[in-house]
Amino acid sequence: MEISLIDVILIAISSAVVTLFVAYSVFTRVLLPQVREQVDKEFDEKLNIAVDLLSEEVRKSVKQGVLQAVAEIPSAEVLRETTQTIAKTGIDIMGVGLDVMRGRRR
């Protein structure tokens, strides 16, 4: 029995396809789950480190913001004047509203 060149090429292609199928099966069933597990583990570790660092930075920023806001609170005199101005404006608005209800114009 003679093996022709076409037979040799078909056997080589078949062998390559079977080898690729076996390699793909081993990769997807054995290696890929191990790699995914390792990546997930490392990702979780790095994420926890990042969360710890960020939470510390956020805490510092919030503390600094609160201290700055407290330091910028206006003095009691400014607050008193502002309160009086708001009260006077409110009384003026109520007066105009009552005049309109009574039919008077200012």
Image (spheres, rainbow, N blue to C red):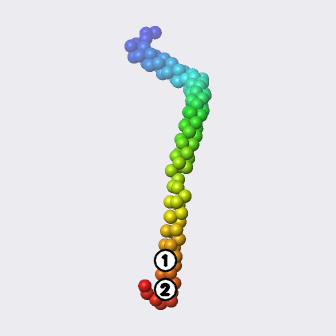
Q: Where is residue 92 in the image (x, y as percent from the top left)?
A: 49, 77
Taking the spot 56% from the left edge, 47% from the top edge, the residue there is 66
The answer to whether 56 is drawn above or below residue 94 in the figure is above
| Residue occupied by mark 1 | 92
Outermost bottom residue? 103
Q: In which quarter of the image is residue 3?
A: top left
Which secondary structure, mark 2? helix
Is residue 92 visible in the rendered structure shown here?
A: yes
Q: Where is residue 74 in the image (x, y as percent from the top left)?
A: 51, 55
Q: Where is residue 52 in the image (x, y as percent from the top left)?
A: 59, 34
Taking the spot 57% from the left edge, 29% from the top edge, the residue there is 46
Q: Quadrant of residue 4?
A: top left
| Residue occupied by mark 2 | 99
Give the alpha-carbon distance from disc 2 to disc 1, as whole Å.
11 Å
N-terminal label among 2 and 1:
1
Local packing at callout 2 (Cα closer than 10 Å; few below 14, some 14-19, many 20+) is few
Using the image as rendered, state which of residue 77 and residue 31 is in the foreground.
77
Q: What residue type is labelled 1?
A: Asp
Specify the quadrant that holds the C terminus: bottom left
Q: In which quarter of the image is residue 63?
A: top right
